Amino acid sequence: MNILLTNDDGINSSGIYAMAKALQSLGTVHIIAPDRQQSAVGHAITLSTPLRVTKVHLDSELYGLAISGTPADCVKLGVSTLLDVKPDLVVSGINHGSNTAINILYSGTVSAASEGMLMGVRSMAVSLNSFDHTVDMNPAAEYAAMIAGQYVHSPLPLTTILNINVPPLPREEILGVRVTEQGQGAWNDHYDKRTDPYGRDYYWLAGDYEPSITNINTDDRALKEHYVSVTPIRFTLTDHEHLSALSSLQNIRI
């Protein structure tokens, strides 16, 4: 099996390194990731500037390819051009910080997986519910690899992505896997107004995340209760339930 591994934290992230090691038991891992931090860029792709590809070596061996673009760029360029064969699986992660609820919309990690889906490849995103870069990533990587081994042979359509979130706990404290829904958690955010040394104002995004834990089947609730959350997601955005409420618009003509 050929696996394209990417992320949004950059090719030098400890998360992508741990994920690469865990996935080696499933097949050949090709790392194609951003050359810098690209968190919360969503599904942006690069149009107005060229993309640069740099080979990255580790212990004198080729580790992967660093791309001067977004996570979605990495998948699009990798699948269409850089890889000799179409991958069987795209894995994005491991991200520092959860990608639950509304965070899915902003996430470069999830967007890399969704780009894989758009290119006809089974895809999954993996995130750890911690921003602490000293946390052990290996339990999350091992759970993700086990899930990947089943997902790649599953009957799920190619239009379904798996969004995996893992609690930042030792192996023995993770209680297992829970299949969940996308929660309704949201950010109470604001912008801090500050002044630079030249007297010019600038703004820095700040705020607190409030997870949704009232429903036992949400991604946030699973993490709180020490479970790995696996959420099948897709990107069909039409509100079919309320199409008829707009039927009167069909009589409008200028």
Image (cartoon, helix red, strand yellow):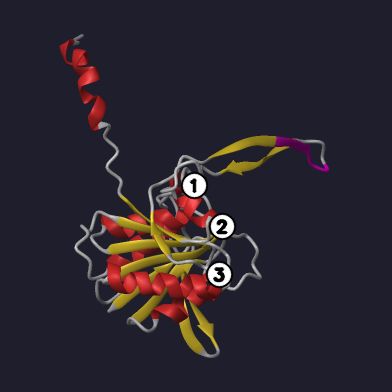
The tag earlier along the polypeptide, 1 or 3, is 1
Mark 1 packing: few (<14 Cα in 10 Å), some, or many (20+)? many
Where does the C terminus fall, quadrant-wise?
Answer: top left
Q: Is mark 3 on a helix, strand or loop?
A: helix
Residue 173 badge: 3
Where does the N terminus fall, quadrant-wise?
Answer: bottom left
Please state which of residues 78 and 225 is positioned toward the viewer in this rendering. Answer: 225
User: Percent x, y for residue 104?
Assistant: 44, 48
Please state which of residues 17 and 170 is positioned toward the viewer in this rendering. Answer: 170
Amino acid at circle 3 = Glu
Q: Identify residue for label 1.
A: 103
Look at the image and tell me whether residue 177 can be seen: yes
What is the spatial separation of the Cα atoms under label 1 and label 3, in whole angstroms?
25 Å
Amino acid at circle 2 = Gly
Please state which of residues 145 and 69 is positioned toward the viewer in this rendering. Answer: 145
Amino acid at circle 1 = Asn
> Does residue 195 belong to the magenta stretch?
yes
Magenta span: chief secondary structure: strand
Mark 1 or mark 3, which is nearer to you? 3
